[in-house]
Image (tube, helix red, strand yellow):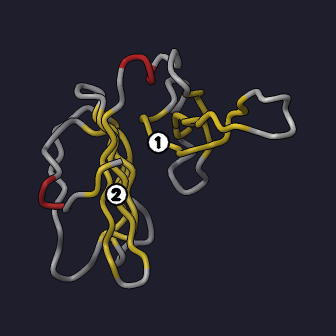
Amino acid sequence: MKQMNISEIPQANYQGYLWYSDKKAPIIFKGDETVAINERDDAFIAEALLWDAATHTSMRIFFHDGKQYVYRKDVTDDELSCRACTSPENYVSHRLQGLRLSFLRYWQPEADEYCEGFDILTPQSLVFVGFDNESK
């Protein structure tokens, strides 16, 4: 994942959500309209997960210990189709109107002394890739 600034996030038809610090619920994007992600003077982005299906780009924004973090991950076709070291995972969110969030789990091969010299796969990262097709 590549670290960046909020101002570098391009306008796109994002799926996902954006949650400002002064709101009780997030803004949900379904990928059907162009969205610009903007900073505000009166509130910060507490968290956001954004997926641009056209460019296979995932964005994650979160606020921790007084600092804003913005990460971008470009997902390849092989990763998206799970032909690489990835596997799909879906989670139900109770605060996002029951939508199911889709992620790719990335795995890293590592040597394991207890497995006869064979590598084992350990979780490396989890990347948001939109809403599950079966979501409302």
* Residue 24 against residue 93 in the figure, above or below: below
Q: Give the residue displayed 46% in from the left and 42% down from the top.
A: 127
Q: Secondary structure at mark 2?
A: strand
Q: Report x, y in % for residue 85.
A: 55, 26
Q: Residue at x 34, y 57 (%)?
A: 18
Helix, strand or loop under label 1: strand
For disc 2, the marked residue is 18
Please tell me in which quadrant of the rendered image residue 110 appears.
top right
Count of numbered labels shown in the rendering: 2
At a point 49% along the width and 24% down the height, the residue shown is 133
Pinpoint residue 45: horizontal percent, then vertical percent. 31, 69
x, y percent for residue 25: 44, 64
Residue 94 to residue 66: above or below:
above
Left or right: 10 as drawn, with respect to 100: left
> Between tags 1 and 2, which lies in front?
1
Q: To which residue does mark 1 refer?
A: 127
Q: Are there few (<14), some (14-19), or many (20+) residues within 10 Å of tag 1?
A: many
Q: Is residue 90 left or right of residue 80?
A: right
Residue 61 vertical placement versus 78 (above, below): below
Q: Nearer the viewer, residue 93 or 119?
A: 119
Q: Which mark is residue 20?
A: none
Q: Nearer the viewer, residue 38 or 128?
A: 128
